[in-house]
Image (cartoon, rainbow, N blue to C red):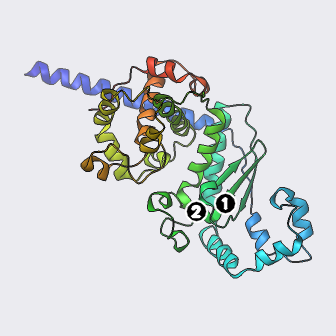
């Protein structure tokens, strides 16, 4: 018994050393990234637009020509800014984002992380606006400009969102803003071939989520995938079951477009066509499984984040040696 007790202590000590080494490595990495110290200056176009009149509109149009469609006359923009509902929208945005400091710091941290992994990255102009609650286009990113619609981050229970399905409005909150920004950048860096096999789609979204692991480590795993903590717990607990379901039904190499609706695209739940499971499952579990496959690939192979993002899905799957948690 004494021998087993001693071995137990040795095993515990070895695990402790590994944990401490990993923590130090992560701390050193974050220290190096913080030293990059990019500046993320946010231009509050939404505030400027809410105060327009006949005198200052020309100046605003000159500073932000891309925010004004030429097919509308100046009178249209004056009327829009003066509209009662628009004014209420401005007021609610100002209430939620009266202090933009914390959000700006999160964006800066995101940019520092992107710059670390992609030295060629040049931070864009960051411009906030309102969009009449166009929640499907919350963040738009180009090579030089990023536009964020603040009226889509007022809180999942906000009165403006009552007609939006619950599973979609869960992410319409301030805490998810930088997650959405990271997602848009992930799409710019990740490679996706035209083949639409279910496995390809899972791994593509797994790439996006692993990109977010790297660039927004200050957000929780649940926030990165857009789950509640309870939904993430369900996915973790049922990982083995879900993988077995996909394999036994030979879904991995299927090109059935319905699989995207069932397991990849936003939905209130995933569709296994099993009443007890469907009722409890979160949507997009195919993305979750893809995330675990890509994580396994990164753990099993000496590859950089950039190399992973452009790797072929079949290569990632074959070299991941993925085994679901039981």
Q: Which residue is mark 2?
A: 153
Is residue 102 visible in this depiction of the protein? yes
Left or right: 93, with 242 as reference point: right
Left or right: 52, with 207 as reference point: right
Percent across and percent down for residue 299 are 45, 24
Percent across and percent down for residue 323 are 34, 25
Crowdedness near tag 1: few (<14), some (14–19) or many (≥20) residues, C-alpha within 10 Å: many
Which quarter of the image is occupied by the C terminus? top left
Q: Which residue is mark 1?
A: 149
Q: Nearer the viewer, residue 180 or 126?
A: 180
Q: Nearer the viewer, residue 46 or 268?
A: 268
Q: Regarding mark 2 in the picture, which secondary structure is present there?
A: loop
Q: Residue at x 73, y 67 (%)?
A: 46
**Count the marks: how many?**
2
Q: Residue at x 52, y 24 (%)?
A: 313
Give the label on residue 274, or none: none
């Amino acid at each position: 018994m004494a021998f087993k007790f001693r071995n137990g202590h040795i095993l515990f000590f070895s695990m402790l050393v590994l944990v401490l080494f990993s923590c130090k490595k992560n701390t050193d990495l974050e220290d190096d990234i913080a030293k990059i110290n990019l500046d993320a200056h946010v231009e509050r176009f939404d505030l400027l637009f809410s105060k327009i009149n006949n005198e200052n509109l020309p100046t605003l149009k000159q500073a932000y020509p891309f925010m004004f469609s030429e097919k509308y006359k100046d009178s249209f923009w004056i009327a829009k800014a003066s509209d009662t509902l628009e004014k209420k929208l401005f007021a609610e945005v100002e209430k939620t984002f009266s202090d933009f400091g914390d959000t700006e710091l999160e964006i800066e941290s995101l940019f520092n992380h992107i710059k670390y992994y992609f030295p060629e990255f040049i931070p864009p102009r960051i411009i906030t606006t309102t969009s009449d609650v166009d929640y499907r286009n919350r963040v738009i990113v180009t090579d030089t400009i990023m536009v964020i619609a603040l009226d889509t981050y007022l809180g999942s229970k906000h009165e403006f969102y009552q007609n939006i399905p619950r599973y979609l409005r869960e992410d319409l909150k301030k805490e998810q803003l930088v997650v959405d920004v990271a997602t848009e950048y992930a799409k710019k860096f990740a490679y996706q071939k035209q083949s639409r096999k279910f496995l390809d789609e899972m791994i593509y979204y797994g790439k996006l989520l692993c990109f977010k692991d790297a660039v927004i480590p200050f957000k929780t795993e649940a926030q990165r995938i857009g789950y509640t903590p309870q939904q993430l717990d369900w996915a973790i607990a049922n990982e083995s079951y879900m993988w077995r379901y996909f394999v036994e039904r030979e879904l991995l190499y299927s090109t059935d477009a319905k699989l995207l609706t069932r397991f990849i695209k936003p939905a209130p739940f995933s569709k296994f066509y099993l009443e007890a499971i469907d009722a409890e499952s979160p949507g997009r579990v195919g993305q979750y499984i893809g995330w675990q496959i890509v994580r396994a690939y990164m753990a099993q192979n000496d590859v950089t984040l950039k190399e992973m993002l452009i790797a072929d899905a079949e290569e990632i799957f074959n070299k991941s040696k993925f085994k679901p948690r039981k």
